[in-house]
């Protein structure tokens, strides 16, 4: 609706604008409070009241409804991120090592062996996170939301949209897979920092989420082996 004559907004348009502003402010405040509470509580270890492991974890994952937030697999720390050219040039970034590529493939194979219902796969637009997702699942959609900021500077990181994503359930009967970095997870859920290739299993809860499990890279083979031996 165009502004009313003379540049002023009509009552209906002004009311809609105020509602939009209030909604955005509320979402931002919810994200801030959620992150502040998580950091105050001090741990992204599984909540004892909701923790899952072993066969119970596999059964829950097969039913869907969770987000698996992976930190990218092992990288070559002799390389550094020199991002002046943007994120499209992998030669200016720290990339997966050969061990990291093997790690990602092995995790993907275990997930398929466990018959987990993989839904959307979202990756930070860095080369190492996109490659992790594609090696695990054969696909990955780049998104700055799971990274927390646009461009090449983390100075103005804002996790509001990431909190909203993690608080929302994935498509019914599926798991949402995210391949990103350790920092956003630590910022929202607290320490300890995810190791390379480690996943936090998150269940939506109100305006945020709860951590129900953490799965290290080597844990996947054990979960798959246990299921095969049944």
Image (cartoon, helix red, strand yellow):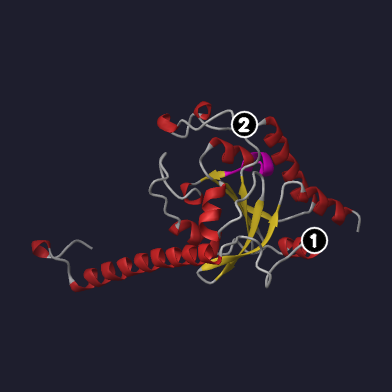
219 horizontally vs 207: left or right: right
Check if residue 68 falls in the magenta segment: no
Most frequent secondary structure within the magenta stretch: helix
The image quadrant of residue 7 is bottom left
Q: Residue at (80%, 48%) from the top-left corner?
A: 221
Q: How crowded is mark 2: few (under 14 residues within 10 Å), some or many (20 or more)?
A: some
x, y percent for residue 194: 62, 50
x, y percent for residue 225: 86, 51
The vertical placement of 115 against 56, above or below, is above
| First of labels 1, 2 by sequence position | 1
The image quadrant of residue 132 is top right
124 horizontally vs 227: left or right: left
Q: Residue at (68%, 43%) from the top-left corner?
A: 136
Q: Identify the element where label 1 is drawn.
A: helix
- Which sits in the foreground, 174 or 132? 132
Q: Name the residue under label 1.
A: 54
Check if residue 134 falls in the magenta segment: yes
The vertical placement of 82 against 37, above or below, is above
Q: Name the residue under label 2.
A: 76
The vertical placement of 202 against 149, above or below, is below
x, y percent for residue 51: 70, 67
Q: What stretch is highlighted in magenta?
A: 133-140
């Amino acid at each position: 609706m165009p502004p009313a004559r003379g540049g002023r907004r009509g009552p209906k348009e002004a009311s809609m604008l105020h509602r939009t502003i209030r909604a955005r402010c509320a979402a931002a405040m919810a994200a801030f409070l959620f992150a502040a509470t998580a950091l105050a509580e001090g741990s992204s270890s599984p909540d004892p009241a909701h923790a899952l492991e072993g066969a119970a974890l596999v059964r829950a994952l097969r039913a869907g409804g969770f987000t698996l937030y992976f930190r990218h697999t092992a990288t070559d720390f002799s390389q550094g991120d020199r991002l002046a050219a943007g994120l499209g040039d992998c030669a200016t970034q720290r990339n997966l090592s050969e061990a990291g590529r093997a790690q990602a493939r092995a995790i993907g194979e275990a997930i398929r062996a466990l018959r987990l219902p993989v839904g959307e796969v979202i990756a930070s637009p860095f080369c190492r996170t996109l490659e992790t997702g594609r090696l695990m699942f054969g696909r990955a959609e780049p998104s700055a939301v799971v990274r927390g900021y646009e461009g090449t500077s983390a100075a103005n990181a804002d996790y509001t949209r990431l909190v909203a994503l993690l608080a929302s359930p994935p498509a019914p009967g599926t798991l949402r897979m995210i391949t990103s970095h350790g920092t956003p997870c630590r910022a929202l859920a607290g320490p300890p920092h995810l190791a390379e290739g480690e996943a936090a299993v998150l269940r939506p809860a109100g305006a945020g989420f709860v951590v129900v499990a953490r799965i290290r890279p080597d844990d996947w083979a054990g979960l798959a082996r246990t299921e095969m031996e049944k």
